Structures are given as C-alpha cells and as structure tokens.
Image (tube, rainbow, N blue to C red):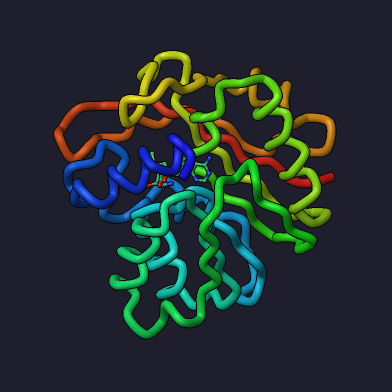
Amino acid sequence: MTKRKQHWENVYETKGDQEVSWYQEIPVTSLNLIDSLNLKKDDTIIDIGGGNSNLVVQLSKKGFKNLSVLDISAKSLERTKLKLKQTAENINWIVTDILEFQTSFEFSLWHDRATFHFLTEKEDIEKYVKLVEKAIKTDGFLIIATFSNTGPFKCSGLEITQYSKETLLGLFHDKFELIDAFDDVHKTPFETEQNFIYTVFKRK
Ligand SMILES: C[S@@+](CC[C@H](N)C(=O)[O-])C[C@H]1O[C@@H](n2cnc3c(N)ncnc32)[C@H](O)[C@@H]1O
C-alpha cells in the first residue's frame, strides 16, 4: 500500500463524518452548480475523491442514473455505500489513486472538490490535466474546487497546492473554456472557515 493510500484509509477508519474538516451535510455549492448545467438524468457524472461526500447521495436522489465515484480509499466508499443502501448497486465505485486512473470512457461532468489540490508535484498536476482533457467529452463540464490563495496550506495534515481563477485557467485553458469562477467559504464541522475557489469549465 502506498503512503498516500495508507493515510486516507487510516483517516476513514478512525474519523467520523463530523471529525473531518471537509465534510458537508449537503454539498450545496456543488449541487447548485450542477443544477445550472442542465444535464440530462442519464448523463455520465464522476466525483473524483468523492470519499465520504454526500454529493452522490444527493445526485442519486435527484434521479441521475450514470454516477461514478472514485477514491483512493476503499473504506470511504464503503461508508458512502452504506448511506445509499440498495441504490449503491447502481453506482460505479472506483478505488484507485487518481494518478493511476485509466479510462476510455468520456464523462459529461467531472467533479472534484478538494482532491486535485493534494497534487503538489508538477508532473502529477500535468498528468491530472492530461487525464481530464481525455476523459471529458466535447461540451462536457469540469467542476474543480480547491483551497484558494487565502485558504489553508494543508488539509488532513498533508501539503496542498492553493489555486486562483488565473492559475486554474492557466492549467486548463488549452482544451477548456472557463464559464464560471467564484470564491466560496466552507464552514467546517468545527465551526472554522476555509476559503475555496470554484471553477467551472466546458470542454472545447
Ligand atoms: C479533502 S477530502 C474531500 C472529499 C470530498 N470530495 C468532499 O468534498 O467532501 C479528499 C478526498 O480525496 C481522496 N484522495 C486524496 N488523494 C487522492 C488520490 N491521489 N486519488 C484519489 N483520491 C484521493 C481522499 O481519500 C479523500 O476522500
């Protein structure tokens, strides 16, 4: 097991939802953004580093039928499956490090909240960008939310990369058009605040 996987399996073995800073009972900002994209219920959606997020639970309730959740931690996905009960069977669960993910599949929406920012090496960031370019269909969408330039320097004890609208645009502009960008403040379960930047791109 890699050190990275070990870290995340340990987090989800030992901490409940309310004990991790990123937890949201309802991921309102992401859900509002997804609503605004007017996707069809059979469009393909993947949540990268979905972990213990309730996004897939909410999307499933809204009637989305082609949902995938990817995470390096098997334990995190087991926990989300329990929340979904029988509906979990209709969802595609992928346990892998995103840097090892290979897919010939093209998604209508790629959603990543607070996972991309854990990549701190230039080659890893470039690898992720290339993967996203390949994995999203023409006119498909990319939602990326990371800590902003005024956000924390670490998450779950790990170094992260902070981003701004400009630095995200710099990474993705080749194959994507920026359609929305805004700052957002996440209130953690411990009543502290974390500054995020949300960006929405459309595949050219
Ligand atoms: C800060 S949490 C965010 C969870 C979720 N996206 C949310 O918004 O609540 C980061 C998640 O990314 C996963 N993760 C971290 N590095 C990863 C990697 N290299 N590949 C896949 N998943 C990863 C972790 O297991 C964890 O569930």
Quadrant the C terminus occupies: top right
Residue 115's x, y, as percent? 49, 39
Residue 144 visible, this orientation: yes
> From the viewer's perspective, is 37 left or right of 194?
right
Looking at this view, is 159 or 47 the one in front? 159
Residue at screen point 37% across, 85% down? 86
Residue 172's x, y, as percent? 74, 31
Q: Residue farthest to the front?
A: 1
Instruction: Count how many numbered circles sit on residues in the image.
Output: 0
Residue 181's x, y, as percent? 58, 32
Residue 114 visible, this orientation: no
Residue at screen point 44% across, 64% down? 56
Looking at this view, is 75 or 167 the one in front? 75
Q: Which image quarter: residue 65?
A: bottom right
> From the viewer's perspective, is 104 left or right of 116?
right
> From the viewer's perspective, is 39 left or right of 23?
right
